Amino acid sequence: MKVFLRFFGICVLWFPGLSSGQITMTNGDHTIEITGSISTYYNHRFMKEGELNLRKNRFRLRDAQLQIEGRYKKTIEYELQVDFSDIGQSLTGVIDPENPGIMDAYVHYKGLGIVDLTFGYTKLPYSRSSLVPFVYTPYWQRAEIVRGDIFSRRDIGVSLSKTFWRQRVKIEGGIYNGLGELSLRGDNDPSGNLEYIGRAEVAYPSRFRYRDIDDRITPVPMFAAGFNARYTDKSQPVGNRTLPGGAGGEYNVKVIDGKKYVYGFDLAFQWMGFSAQYEFHYYRATPRDSNNFMLMGLPKWQTGGFFQGGGMYGQLNYFSKPLKSIFSVRYEELMLNDLIAGKMVRFGGAYAFQLNGWKSMIKVQYWLIDQEDPLDPLRWTSQVRLGWQYLFQ
Amino acid sequence: MNGKKFLSIAIAWIAILICTGQKINAVKIKPFLSHYIEVSEPSDLVYYPENNSFFIVSDNGELYETSLNGKILRKAPIDGVDFEAITLVDNYLYVVEERHRNVLKIDPKSLEVVQTIYIPYAGGRNKSFESIAYIPDMEKFILITEKDPIIIMEFDQNFNKINMTRFTGARDISSATYHLGYLYFLSDEDRTIFKIKPTNYDILKAWKIPVINPEGIVVMPDHTFRILSDDREKMYYFKNPD
């Protein structure tokens, strides 16, 4: 760790002002822009007594992204974003929901007039944190509840959206495959059913962009609130039909063989460099099979045939323009299954130093485990991640 | 290297970075009036003395003539993409279409486009020309890219490029205008009005304004500033501290 810190310090001392722009081409009707990002960090875990496997103490190429955004006249916008560092991993069959390889491949049509239509693979209109571009945060990882293992963050489908009241209100709803990032493999699950998602958000006194940090030092307090819900019934047909491998995510709750409702709300605030976010999510899962292992072998009269879970996170941030720095603290809770007592509680924080705005930034994040969920025992007690984010945009 | 040494170097390095760049103290000023306008997502404005009105452009590629309190009087029949800047020179409007890198010369009476000038720029699709102004003493137009980097491009009256200068005094420039021998630049991200010397683009004065997403500036004949907020779709009135 010490050697790494020395080397890292020397690197950033030498290259503080590096930046370069993106490339845009236009022919009068059609405009295409190429941008991208590269980020690498070093991760160090502080393990529990007796734990000898230190494989997570390593450098990791988090992002190697290339993004092509285009616009044709006033009606069509499209985006193709690929992360080459994750494509290598997904070829092994493992898809990290926070870094799924293909990040966006959609067309947004504004020609209907009444509503806008989005078609393809992109972020789902659920959870404000999920909708914030990650490069505009001082963190290396989102809060556990919104990382993509409890509910999916991206999927293939179609959505309609509309803004009102000088863009301060936005309503969006869509239909998707329901397998999340696994939809990239091609087929739906044997049930063939889809997922339905809706989100409404309101901001005051003006529209509130999807950003966590108040880098514009907003002179007037700004607020935003969002409410979202989603539903799918992925009950597998009779026979030996099962969900695709990995559909359940890290905790086996992301997609279940049965019905699943998820509800949530989020709040955001910013003023004079200070900003705060809070999100709460609740899910209720009803497995098709009353013997499903997530019902913990309990009788139906005791469980009602379903289990519940959810969690929250709160984050406070401060952007100091003269110090070119972002300071942030985070508190998070996650309960995977109400049929087992206990929940995960974590504290954390992040600091980012902007060498050249968001384009070139050193970020450090710290996690401290306070409580563990009984369904997800950990081998480590705390973790620190330090690295460099570089955007060519 | 021990921890103390590393920390000292880090602090020294941060201090050097903080001290770099052009620095000027901005004085805070407050609006004496503000009101909503009828134009959606306004991005810049220019005063039109002949009708005592404004021409306002929008992010949606629309050009409107409005009353001084922002009520729409006329809409140009132009199918633009995203208009970000406007100025008035010799009784013609010059409107900047950012993504397509076009400057449209428009007759303010008929609202018809009389000339389209393409100005290549390979930088960010949405970080291209956000400001246009004309310096009459030097008979030149300037176009300014929004950010990453901020480049002031100078053109003669036929839009032949004659010079390029980098501007490092702000994080971005969202609008520019000329008034009585000086340029005035507006920064959205820094929420600041800069008074600029047109010969070398030195910052003479700066005023901090409490406006969310300021995108358009004009200096009125009575020397007051009008500032447009894109996100709030509001117009703010400021006394000129000069």
Image (cartoon, coloured by chain):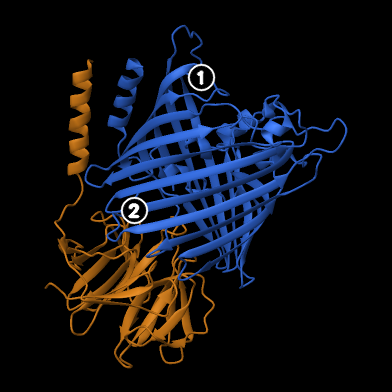
Chain colours: A blue, B orange
The location of residue B20, given as percent across then percent down, is: 19, 44
Query: What is the spatial separation of the Cα atoms under label 1 and label 2, in whole angstroms?
Result: 35 Å
**Residue ranking furthest to the left:** B242
Q: Are marks 1 and 2 in contact (CB under 8 Å)?
A: no
For the point 55% across and 68% down, the residue is: A28
Q: Is residue A365 visible?
A: yes
Q: Does A55 appear above or below A233?
A: above
Q: Answer with the quarter of the image where residue A325 lies.
A: top left
The lab-note entry on whether marks 1 and 2 share a chain reads: yes
Quadrant including the N terminus of chain B: top left
Judged from the image, the secondary structure of the residue bearing numbered disc 1 is loop
Q: Badge 1: how crowded within 10 Å, few (<14), some, or many (20+)? A: few
> In terms of depth relative to the viewer, which is nearer, B80 or A189?
A189
Horizontal side of residue B240 vs A133, given as left or right: left
For the point 63% across and 70% down, the residue is: A111
Mark 1: which amino acid? Answer: Leu
Q: Which residue is mark 2?
A: A270
Query: Tag 2 or tag 1, which sits nearer the N-term?
Result: 2
Q: Does B124 appear above or below B5?
A: below
Point out which mark residue A364 bears: none
> In terms of depth relative to the viewer, which is nearer, A302 or A62?
A302
Mark 2: which amino acid? Answer: Gln
Judged from the image, the secondary structure of the residue bearing numbered disc 2 is strand
Q: Is residue B148 visible?
A: no
Q: Which residue is mark 1?
A: A378
Q: Answer with the quarter of the image where residue A236 lies.
A: top right
The location of residue B122, given as percent across then percent down, is: 45, 56
Identify the subunit bearing mark 1. Answer: A
Q: Badge 2: how crowded within 10 Å, few (<14), some, or many (20+)? A: many
Horizontal side of residue A238 vs B168, given as left or right: right
**Residue ranking furthest to the front:** A301
